[in-house]
Image (cartoon, grey):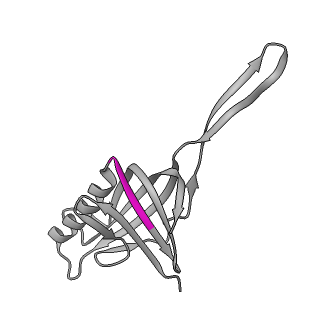
Amino acid sequence: MIDLTVLIASPTGMLNLNTYPYRISGESFASETTSHRKTEASNPYVEGTFVVNTVRENIGTSLAVWVYTDPPNRNELLRALGALKDALDQAFFTVTLTVNGGTQLWNCVTSDYNVESQRELVHATRAKLVAQLNRLPYEEYV
């Protein structure tokens, strides 16, 4: 059994994404995308180009969170979903990921997301928010 805690800084305080009304989905952290910003040099007399300098761009990390209420309550669901959206809409926020006692601190910028539910959101009793976290290319281990 994996001991997992995910905390995200929101305008209203820290949200624990693995306690009620949130639950981390199994597809979270399953993929990570890294690209590089390169400065290249070329020469008309030599084939190809040479990389002179390279730095990493922001890293994209998948995050999927189930949002639910018990007993089912539409207003509470929308409130919890709104708090999570507000966190991801910030220009800058932190995510603290603790797995089996090892903790990483990620500095993130505004992230894209979509919301899925089993039926129209006005009648939904649970929803899944799937986000692509845009985190800066360095991590802190605390």
Q: Which residue sits furthest right?
A: 46
Q: Residue at 49% of width from left, 59% of height from top? A: 62
Q: Which of 6 and 106 is in front in this view?
A: 106
Q: In which quarter of the image is residue 117?
A: bottom left
Q: Residue at 41% of width from left, 62% of height from top? A: 95
Q: In which quarter of the image is residue 13?
A: bottom left
Q: Position of residue 61 (x, y in %)?
A: 50, 56
Left or right of residue 22, residue 36 in this image: right
Count all numbered tags in the image, as a single digit. Answer: 0
Q: Which of 127 and 7 is in front in this view?
A: 7
Q: Which residue sits furthest top?
A: 44
Q: Which residue sits furthest bottom?
A: 1
Look at the image and say whether residue 24 sits in the magenta stretch: no
Q: Which residue sits furthest front?
A: 142
Q: Residue at 38% of width from left, 69% of height from top? A: 7
Look at the image and say whether residue 92 sits in the magenta stretch: yes
In this view of the protein, can residue 19 be seen by the observer? yes
Question: Is residue 81 shown above or below 18?
Answer: above
Q: In which quarter of the image is residue 67?
A: bottom left
Q: Where is residue 93 in the image (x, y as percent from the top left)?
A: 36, 55
Question: Is residue 78 shown above or below 108?
Answer: below
Q: Residue at 53% of width from left, 80% of height from top? A: 100
Taken as a whole, is the magenta stretch helix, strand or loop? strand
Left or right of residue 88, residue 105 in this image: right
In this view of the protein, can residue 120 be seen by the observer? no
Please report the bounds of the magenta region as a residue range. Answer: 91-96
Q: Position of residue 64 (x, y in %)?
A: 42, 64
Q: Nearer the viewer, residue 122 or 94?
A: 94
Q: Position of residue 2 (x, y in %)?
A: 52, 82
